[in-house]
Amino acid sequence: MGIPVLIIGKSGAGKSRSMKNCVGKDFGLIRVLNKPLPFKGKLAGNVCTDYGKIKAAVKSKQWPKSIVIDDAGYLITKQFMDGHSTTGKGNAVFGLYNQLADDFYRLIDCISNEVPEDRIVYVIMHEDVNEFGDIGPKTIGKLLDEKVCLPGMFTIILRAVKGERYVFVTQSRDGAVSKSPDDMFPEIEIDNDLLLVDNTIRQYYGIENPKNQEREDETL
C-alpha cells in the first residue's frame, strides 16, 4: 500500500517550487505539462499524459521511492478537451464525464493499493472555489467532487500558499481543504519544501529513505 499525498494551490503559490531541494535525491517526476521547472537542476522522469503509463511507472520498483505527478489536474483537462468536441450530446456527454471521473479515481486508487508500500506519490493540482466558498482541488464537472469526493481518498493534503513567504498549510484553514495526522507536522504552516515533507512523512510511518537523508559534504 503506497501513500498518496495531494498538494493543491493557486498558480504561483509554490507547488512546483517545493521540489527544488529534491534535485539529486531519490525523487521521480512525471510532468503532465511539458513546461520548465521554476528552479535550476533536473529531476529524473518524463512527460506523460497516458494513464496506463503513469500507473505502470508508480507501480514499478525501478522508479524512485518518491514520485511527483506535477499538474495532475491537466490529465482531466486534456481528456476533456480531446473528447468533448466529438462526443455529441446527451448520454454521450454524460459518458465522457463518467470516463473522466473513472480514470482519475482509478489512478489514485492504484497509488493507494498497488504501489510498493514504501512509496509516496505526490499528486499536484490547482485549487478551485465552489459555490459555497470551499476551496479544494480543481476538476472538470461535478462527478469527481460529488460522487467520488476526491479529498477523501487522501490522508494528507497540503495547500501551497504564498504570503510573506512560501508555505504549506497542513490543516484545514480559511475554508480550504488541508489535512494531516495531528502529530505529523510541528505547525499548521511549514516550509514549502517537499524534501522536508517527504522525510517527515516517512519518519512518521517508519518508512525512512536513507537516500533522501544524506547530506552533501560541506567544504570547510
Image (cartoon, rainbow, N blue to C red):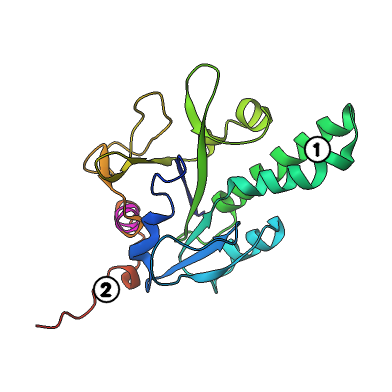
Q: Is 30 positioned to the left or the right of 18 in the image?
A: right
Q: Nearer the viewer, residue 164 or 190?
A: 164
The region drawn magenta spans 196-203
Q: Nearer the viewer, residue 84 or 206?
A: 84
Q: Is residue 183 visible?
A: no
Q: Residue at x 51, y 16 (%)?
A: 132
Q: x%, y% of residue 115?
A: 56, 59
Instruction: In the rendered structure, find residue 96 and report the number of the disc placed on it.
Output: 1
The residue to which callout 2 is attached is 214
Above or below for 206 versus 41: above
Above or below for 31 versus 74: below
> Residue 80's image quarter?
top right
Q: Is residue 220 visible?
A: yes
Find the residue positioned furthest to the left.
220
Q: Nearer the viewer, mark 2 or mark 1?
A: 1
- Choose the circle earlier in sequence order: 2 or 1: 1
Q: Is 88 positioned to the left or the right of 157 in the image?
A: right
Residue type at numbered disc 2 = Glu
User: Disc 2 to disc 1, how far (Cα)?
Assistant: 46 Å
Residue type at numbered disc 1 = Leu
Local secondary structure at mark 1: helix
Q: x%, y% of residue 110?
A: 61, 52
Above or below for 45 versus 117: below
Q: Residues within 10 Å of mark 2 (few under 14, many from 20)?
A: few
Q: Residue at x 52, y 44 (%)?
A: 125
Local secondary structure at mark 2: loop
Find the residue positioned furthest to the top.
132
Asked whether 47 falls inside the magenta stretch, the response is no
Q: Main secondary structure of the magenta part?
A: helix
Q: x%, y% of residue 81?
A: 75, 44
Q: Residues within 10 Å of mark 1 (few under 14, many from 20)?
A: some
